[in-house]
Image (cartoon, rainbow, N blue to C red):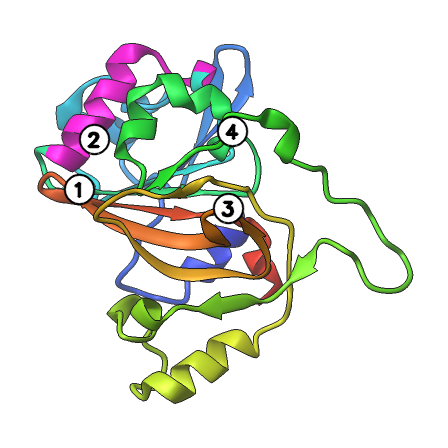
């Protein structure tokens, strides 16, 4: 619902959301067309034509059991053949190793970890600094990418992004895939491949995919 409020200020954007409210029940938000509401009543569409009406699909902290093979394949077709966009967003389930055996992992611009124990729950801290807080660091590729363009001056844009409030927790992914572009990284945490990735993008067939490994953007 935070995303709905944030996007509502831009008249060029329209957000349709699907939330699972029970084992076989779903709630669709932002839907203005009754036909579309009926198409989403059973959750994520299985029919690729139903998905083609959208420009970008966002998965946020979902597990594979939310989808069947038909739905996953329809999403891959949406990006690879139709030229749609896909964003994996969140600091938890959406980047966990359980996705490694799915076609969705193939589409991501990052390689997922194999060890689920690397995912840590963010503790509640009532006093003092939370050890899970961190700042983003914009990479040289990020400084020259239009996605992170702020004022039009790369140096000032970098300063603006890195001066934003700290984020809280992130999903550890192993590394970027060949051909992917890393735009932002963790300012402290690293693994054997370098700084932990926060934002990465890549071309995937006719479309594009992105990974944003945080879900505390409401702090901005």
Q: Position of residue 38 (x, y in %)?
A: 30, 22
Q: Position of residue 218 (x, y in %)?
A: 58, 59
Mark 1 or mark 4: which is in front? 4
**Figure quadrant of residue 74:** top left
Q: Magenta span covers which residues? A: 65-80
User: Residue extending furthest right?
Assistant: 127
Marks 4 and 2, how far apart at CA: 25 Å
Mark 1 or mark 3: which is in front? 3
Marks 1 and 2, how far apart at CA: 9 Å
Q: Position of residue 78 (x, y in %)?
A: 16, 32
Badge 1 vs badge 2, beta-carbon distance below 8 Å: yes
Residue, x 30% and y 42% (percent of image)? 177
Q: Which residue in the structure is indicated by mark 4? A: 96
Mark 4 or mark 2: which is in front? 4
Q: Give the left or right position of residue 87, taking residue 130 as reference.
A: left
Residue, x 13% and y 34% (percent of image)? 80
Q: Position of residue 99 (x, y in %)?
A: 42, 23
Q: Which of the numbered marks, if any, corresponds to residue 192?
A: 3
The quadrant of the rendering that contains the C terminus is bottom right
Q: Give the left or right position of residue 160, taking residue 45 as reference.
A: right
Badge 1 vs badge 3, beta-carbon distance below 8 Å: no
Name above or below for residue 148 compared with residue 57: below
- How many residues crowd around disc 1 within 10 Å: few (fewer than 14), some, or many (20 or more)? many
Residue, x 48% and y 11% (percent of image)? 24
Marks 3 and 4, how far apart at CA: 19 Å
The answer to whether residue 124 of the structure is visible from this angle is yes
């Amino acid at each position: 619902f935070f995303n709905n409020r944030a996007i509502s200020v831009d008249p060029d954007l329209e957000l349709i959301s699907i939330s699972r409210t029970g084992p076989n029940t779903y709630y669709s938000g932002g839907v203005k067309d009754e036909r579309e509401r009926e198409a989403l009543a059973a959750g994520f569409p299985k029919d690729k034509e139903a998905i083609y009406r959208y420009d970008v699909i966002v998965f946020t902290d979902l597990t594979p059991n939310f989808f069947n093979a038909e739905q996953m394949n329809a999403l891959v077709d949406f990006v690879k053949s139709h030229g749609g966009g896909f964003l994996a967003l969140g600091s938890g389930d959406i980047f966990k190793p359980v996705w490694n055996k799915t076609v969705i992992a193939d589409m991501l611009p990052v390689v997922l970890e194999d060890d689920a124990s690397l995912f840590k729950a963010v503790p509640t801290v009532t006093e003092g600094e939370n050890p899970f807080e961190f700042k983003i660091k914009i990479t040289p590729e990020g400084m020259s990418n239009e996605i992170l363009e702020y004022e039009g001056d790369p140096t000032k844009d970098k300063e603006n992004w890195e001066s934003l409030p700290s984020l809280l927790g992130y999903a550890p992914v192993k590394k970027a895939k060949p051909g992917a572009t890393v735009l932002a990284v963790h300012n402290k945490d690293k693994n054997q491949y370098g700084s932990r990735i926060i934002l990465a993008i890549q071309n995937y067939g006719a479309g594009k995919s992105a990974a944003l490994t945080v879900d505390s953007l409401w702090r901005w």
